[in-house]
Image (cartoon, grey):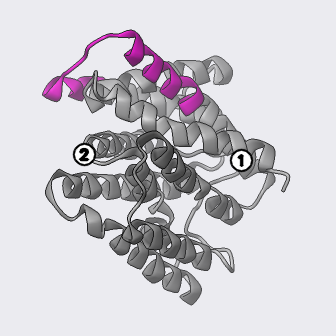
Amino acid sequence: MKEIKFLIPYVVFTAFSYFFVKNGLSYASPLIFMAMRYLIAGLLLLAFSRRLILTRSLLVLTLLTTTSTAFWGYGLLYVSPAESAVLSYSMPLFSLPIAFLMVSEKPSRMETAGIIVGFAGVVLYGIPLLSGFTFVGMVLTLINAAFWASFTVFYRKIRDQDPVAVNATQFILGSIVLFALSPLAFRLHFTTAFLVDLLWMATLGGALQFFLWNSMIRISRVNRITVLAFSVPIFTIVLDVFMTGVLPTIYSVVGVAVMFAGISLSRLKGGISFVVPPRATKR
């Protein structure tokens, strides 16, 4: 597994990011936290790309990305980091139908079967969350996954662009959108803990995370990386048990297993579901 040297740090940094965001949201509202994260990460990437790409396609990509991130942040107000990770990584299941609608690519029977099995896993996992604010968090996080799938598929339309410049642009433009919306629900309390959370999400959980993802995409098949990336929610669940001492319910364990089976099934013969150009990145 030549991608293992990138996969291990990617999984670790991404899994811990759910906990850093969750903690950071106790000091700041989701919009202002993500706006600051986007700005710092965008400036870091701009230092390498040295240019921005200001086109209509990049504006659409930015809107999809920031919408996904906003729903992710608001979802984390109501669900645990482990729950957020599992629900977010239902993204490949959304990307199949979205690819059909956006770029007219019809899924195969195997991919369709994978969607059905995968969403059955989402339903099983979500059973313990069907009450109160956790239900709200689950819905918001699933909407985030749908928008994540949308902008991932949208990368096909700009696959000829420099991915570092693309990511720098979507971060910087996205920060402008998020800063503009942040007065709608503004809350910010600067502390040392908040700065640690923010810097993690802008660097190890931001710019470096994208670099690691890009590196894996360059050296391995996208479908393979998609399945391997499901290590993130699994590792996040382990971290959550270690940090809280609370074991997951049987619904959670079975739901995760069925979700993983569905994602794996939809990838057996390749496919169009998780469409990312060479060297492209994720959220």
101 left or right of 188? right
* Residue 140 or residue 127, whichever sits in front: 127
Q: Which residue is mark 2?
A: 78
Question: Which residue matches tag 1?
Answer: 7
Position of 171 with respect to 4 (left or right) is left
Q: Rounded to the nearest whole Å, what is the CA distance between mark 1 and mark 2?
A: 29 Å
Q: Which residue is depicted at the point 55% across and 41% down?
A: 14
Q: Is residue 78 above or below residue 110?
A: above
Question: In the orientation shown, which residue stands out farthest toward the bottom?
Answer: 109
Residue stretch in magenta: 179-206
Classify 152 as above or below 259.
above
Q: Main secondary structure of the magenta part?
A: helix
> At numbered mark 2, what does the secondary structure look like: helix, strand or loop?
loop
The residue lying furthest to the right in this view is 2
Does 186 appear in magenta?
Answer: yes
Tell me where residue 21 appears, x and y as whole percent: 40, 33
Residue 240 on image: x %, y %: 46, 46
Residue at the image point whose x is 60% and y is 24% from the top: 45
Residue 17 lies, in percent from the top left, at 49, 36
